[in-house]
Image (cartoon, rainbow, N blue to C red):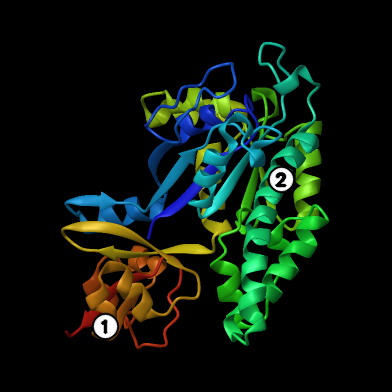
Amino acid sequence: MALKCGIVGLPNVGKSTLFNCLSSAKAQAANFPFCTIEPNLGVITVPDERLTKLAEIVHPGRIVPATCEIVDIAGLVKGASKGEGLGNKFLGNIRECDAIIHVIRCFDDDNVVREGGMAIDPIADKDIIDTELQLKDLETIEAQMAKQEKIAASGNKDAKVLVEVLKAYKEVLDKGQNARSVTFESKEEQKAAHDLFLLTTKPVLYVCNVDEASAKTGNDYSKKIEEMAAQEGAEAMIIAAKTEEDIASLDSYEDKQLFLDELGLEQSGVNRLIEKAYHLLNLQTFITAGEMEVKAWTFHKGWKAPQCAGVIHTDFEKGFIRAEVIKYEDYIQYGSEAAIREAGKLGIEGKDYVVQDGDIMHFRFNV
């Protein structure tokens, strides 16, 4: 299961610099608008020290972490929903993503121009992006509404459900609010809402791009975004993208840790961002561990054992018999699968077992 996040924001807020930190694929980072003409795609690994600790016990042939796709989408501008700045094309790129990483400039630098030459205003920047996404969603809804109302008038039940969903979304969007603020009770409404693929229903992580001096505690700009995010029920975080790029360029783990220590940070902003992206989408990982490999697998929180088995192979889900489950802490404590079995810590679970983050799984199946 691949997680795909799109990095969005106004020109010159640090999107491509952040992308450079996240991925080995290098986006062009230049001090002028639209230096990213095609969306850059990078595949990054999800940091998980549990894999390393298990590998020290199992001695596998390889370690395979979970991965995440990051798309660097060119800077949006006011009027993007009407095609300004190649906006229609880039808004289409956002539609393909599972979540949005919204980068907002929270630093002063006379050498980095701001769109229109205006003073730094992170809330205004955030509102510009929101407005363009909302206008695009309204365009989608209005195009659907006329068609679906005619079908609903003929008695089609699905169309009637969709019309009510469209009306609910239009009401909040007309008020300048994001569609994600609307919730639906019935499964029929939820499916109709999901199938619209609206831009402002996607979960969002606001990333406050600050200067190095503000990397730990933020600044007055970032505090405004954090307060706004709390009111929305959204998530926000602080990152110094240029500093993170410097850290990423260091060769050794020791040098990187020394840099982080000097900044008073326990882990890099990149790692924190990936963790928050996972949390944003309600994702977790289970692990398989053997002589060939120690591997992390991504699943949605709340999934049961057969669904997780299907992440490895569809045959595993179809022919699921049972799951043998070892808790990560028990594996570390007892040091081998044999010792875990002897201690009675190997769980035998059926179809109703809800898999937990960090579970070490072995599936029995028959096809």
Residue 107 vertical position relative to residue 280 in the rendered view, above or below: above
Asked if residue 226 lies left or right of residue 330, the reply is right
Asked if residue 65 lies left or right of residue 103, the reply is left
Residue at (26% x, 74% y) in the render: 314
> Disc 2 and disc 1: Cα gap in Å?
43 Å
Asked if residue 2 lies left or right of residue 110, the reply is left
Q: Position of residue 320 (x, y in %)?
A: 27, 84
Of the pair 344 and 42, the residue shown nearer to us? 42
Q: Which mark is residue 130?
A: 2
Furthest-top residue in this view:
111
Q: Position of residue 327 (x, y in %)?
A: 39, 71
Residue 85 in view in this figure = yes
State which quarter of the image contains the C terminus: bottom left
Q: Quadrant of residue 252?
A: top left
Disc 1: which residue: 318
Q: Secondary structure at mark 1?
A: helix
Check disc 1: other Cα within 10 Å, few if <14, some if 14-19, many if 20+.
some
Q: Amino acid at mark 1?
A: Lys
Q: Amino acid at mark 2?
A: Asp
Of the pair 248 and 306, the residue shown nearer to us? 306
